[in-house]
Image (spheres, helix red, strand yellow):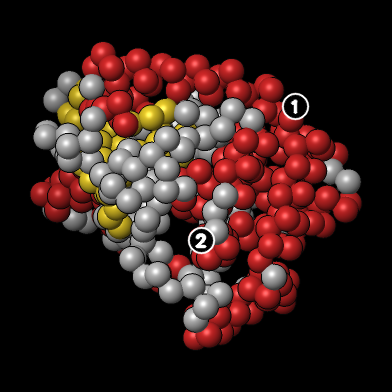
Amino acid sequence: MSVTIHIAGLPLERVVFAPSPLAELGTALHTLAEPGHHPGVHGWATATNASLKQDLADRLCEADFLWRTTFSDILLGFAGLRDASAQPGGTLGEDLDMLDRLDDESYVMAALEFTCGALYGTDAVRSPLADPALRDRALDLAAARGPQQQRFTQRLLDDPPAVRSWIRRLFEDCDRAFFADTWNRVRLRLTADAREKTELLRRRGLAATLAAVSPALSTDEAGSVIDADKLASARTTAVDPAVGPGVTFVPSIYQWPHLVVLHRHGWRPVVHYPVAAPELPGPLSVEQFKLRMEALAHPMRMRLCRNLARAPYSTSELADQYALSSPEVSRHLAVLKKAGLITARRRGRYVQYQLDVKVVGRLGSDFLETVLR
């Protein structure tokens, strides 16, 4: 599974790295709504949430579907403009001005992504503003999320200009309340990262640059695709003449661990990536994660992990303890080792195995607590 951006024939100068104030505001709002996703900035989220005035906090709750469970494409609104030169603005006001240039149908379909997800990435041109069936579907799906989202969706479908103005005022109030200071603090680092990646692209090419952006990104030998390793399957193209050829990479301080790939049909592809931080772990490949989950699903391997979490064991020791043959234990250990869950160390004639508690801890504290019980 992956999200693929086709770039065959795309000149490297059309691969752009640029920070976006609106995108960073969106990731900041997501962090405030879901601080558990972002332990690296937990202190900032706690302090900022505590400082919000009640009116602003209430309005953020009213619209939080735009950033809590999905990262709405309106937060990368420049990508929806059919203008080859459109890129993120230097200020939040410039980004919001570009967002205002979207027509109502594009804006509403992007804002209601959580209710129109089945159409995302397709060339469907129908809009809930014009298609009664899609309108009813959007309202039904919104109702399943609760009365607040149903009311918001109803307002947006009834009067898009009014709700668009309301959302812009909300973002501007966030800027005055906390984001202006936040942006001043992070923009130099984001600008430096974009400049560094641009220079790396010029000197060493696309493959090295993608590896520097995220281990989850890669390209093929021909440089014809950008592949994002994600638990999703989707395709888009960066060589669409209708929207101007190109792909934009937007760095973020608050994005970790999320790697967002905008692949809406008719919009410029955007990769919204976290700036690397040494104290934060890198992403695990989907295939490696699958191997680990399958390895731990077997009851005997779970029992072996209980021993290996406490001390190093040899194959013969484990075989004796569980009344298994040494080859059978070896097969189980090979599965755990291939998944990267155990380490091996030779001691004289014997090889001793031990659970990598740090790796297992990243999979979940419940499992670790169970095997250590």
Q: Residue at x 73, y 63 (%)?
A: 162
Task: State whether residue 207 is above or below residue 64.
Answer: above
Q: Amino acid at mark 2?
A: Ser
Count of marks placed on residues: 2
Q: Identify the image quadrant of residue 199.
A: top left
Mark 1 neighbour density, 10 Å: few (under 14) some (14–19) many (20 or more): few
Residue 343 visible somewhere in the drawing: yes
Residue 216 visible somewhere in the drawing: no
Q: Position of residue 89 (x, y in %)?
A: 56, 32
Q: Which residue is mark 1?
A: 181
Indicate the secondary structure of the residue bearing disc 2.
Answer: helix
Q: Residue at x 49, y 86 (%)?
A: 133
Q: Identify the image quadrant of residue 223.
A: top left
Q: Which residue is mark 2?
A: 106
Q: Identify the image quadrant of residue 85.
A: top left
Task: State whether residue 358 is above or below residue 142.
Answer: above
Q: Is residue 261 left or right of residue 333?
A: right
Q: Is residue 162 left or right of residue 106?
A: right
Q: Nearer the viewer, mark 2 or mark 1?
A: 2
Q: Position of residue 208 (x, y in %)?
A: 26, 23
Q: Residue at x 32, y 51 (%)?
A: 242
Which of the pair 292/253 is nearer the observer?
Answer: 253
